[in-house]
Image (spheres, rainbow, N blue to C red):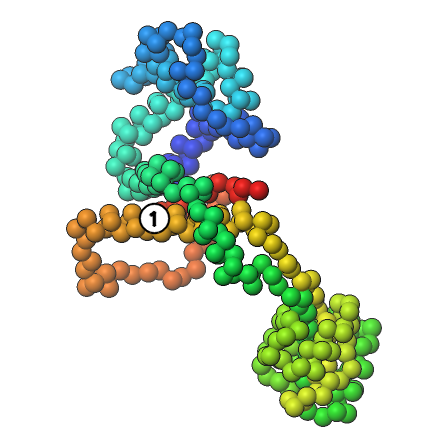
Amino acid sequence: MLGVLLGSFGTLLAAGYLACAKKENKAQATGGARKPESPATFADQNPADLTEVVATIDSTTITVKELQDRINRQSPYVRAKYTSLEQKKDFVDNLIRFEVIAAEAKRRGYDQDPEVVQTMKQVMIQKLMKDEFETRVKLEDVPEDDIKKFFEEHKSEYNKPEEVRVSAIIVKKKDVAQKVAEEAKQPANQDNKAFRDLVAKYSEDEDSKARGGDLRFFAADTKEIPADVVKAAFTLQNQGDVSAPIQTDKGFYILKQTGRRKAITKVYDEVKGQIQNRLYRERRQKAMEEFVDGLKKNAKIEIKEAALGKVRVDTSTPPPVAPGEPGERPTVVPAPRPPAPKQ
């Protein structure tokens, strides 16, 4: 029932107050920046004017300052649409729609509804974490020495050798290997699915067979694959090339090249911004965890396992959610979004 009422509530908002949000989102999508502008920037404005009441809705008032702040929080594109008196009236009308619907919802007791309370808590958590960590941990506070140290300790992440990927059919007998190789080179067996079918039909190595013969990407210095197989794999220049049988202690390999990665070599200046962001996110996450741990430490918390064991979980497959119906969302503690890396 609540879902239906909330849906109706959302429909009413969409017709009025949320029209502003839609215009704002459209403007942002086309590159409009959402940059708050304080009324204090208007040097010629009388401070007494800011306290004047523009509209009243029962016991709720909207002052010049409140309306001015609300309009000036929109993108420049949207702000430009509310310069005339008539346009400002339209904006006020949207706010009035919002207030009267909200007041009716409160009159009916929706402010005490568990779903509404939960949503309010989520919004409060988002606001708290944003305000708490927006300036506590800053990107520019990550020391240069830490960035360089990380780069030196993780050079393998930024410098990778050339790699090749092959699939293999592995058999014990040479005559079978020659027959399979000839079959694999036939035009009808050129695609990967046809080769996987040959793997399923002929391969005697259960481990690789379970993966369709895939040996995954590997470099020339790998020790996990026989050296002769590695050497042959790197001689297959084009995707889809099939090798002749390769003899190893494990049997005969017939390879098909399925991919190749070029070597990657990056210097410090190329990845400095990326590392700085990574260390920043780690520091911020650690600070958030310490903050929450402190709150938990100061709270009186008791978990009763006997009662917890009585909680039943419905493991049946839920019916599909109809378009527009709200779904259950878990409460999460959001992390403030990091700024873009410096180039």
In the rendered view of the protein, which quadrant contains the N terminus?
Answer: top left
Circle 1 is placed at which residue position? 287
Residue 244 placement, left or right of 272: right
Does 77 sit above or below residue 183? above
Residue 149 placement, left or right of 183: left
**Residue at image point 37% right, 6% down:** 46
- Compare residues 228 and 127 and report the one nearer the observer: 228
The answer to whether any part of residue 169 appears in the image is no
**Residue at image point 73% right, 73% down:** 234
The answer to whether any part of residue 8 appears in the image is yes
Where is residue 261? Give x, y as percent: 68, 63
Does 66 sit above or below residue 45? below
- Compare residues 340 and 194 and report the one nearer the observer: 340
Where is residue 231? Give x, y as percent: 71, 78
Does 16 sit above or below residue 192? above
- Compare residues 328 and 331 and report the one nearer the observer: 331
Badge 1: how crowded within 10 Å, few (<14), some, or many (20+)? some
In the rendered view of the protein, which quadrant contains the C terminus?
Answer: top right
- Compare residues 2 and 214 and report the one nearer the observer: 214
Q: Residue furthest front?
A: 145
Residue 251 placement, left or right of 310: right
**Residue at image point 78% right, 67% down:** 238
Secondary structure of residue under mark 1: helix
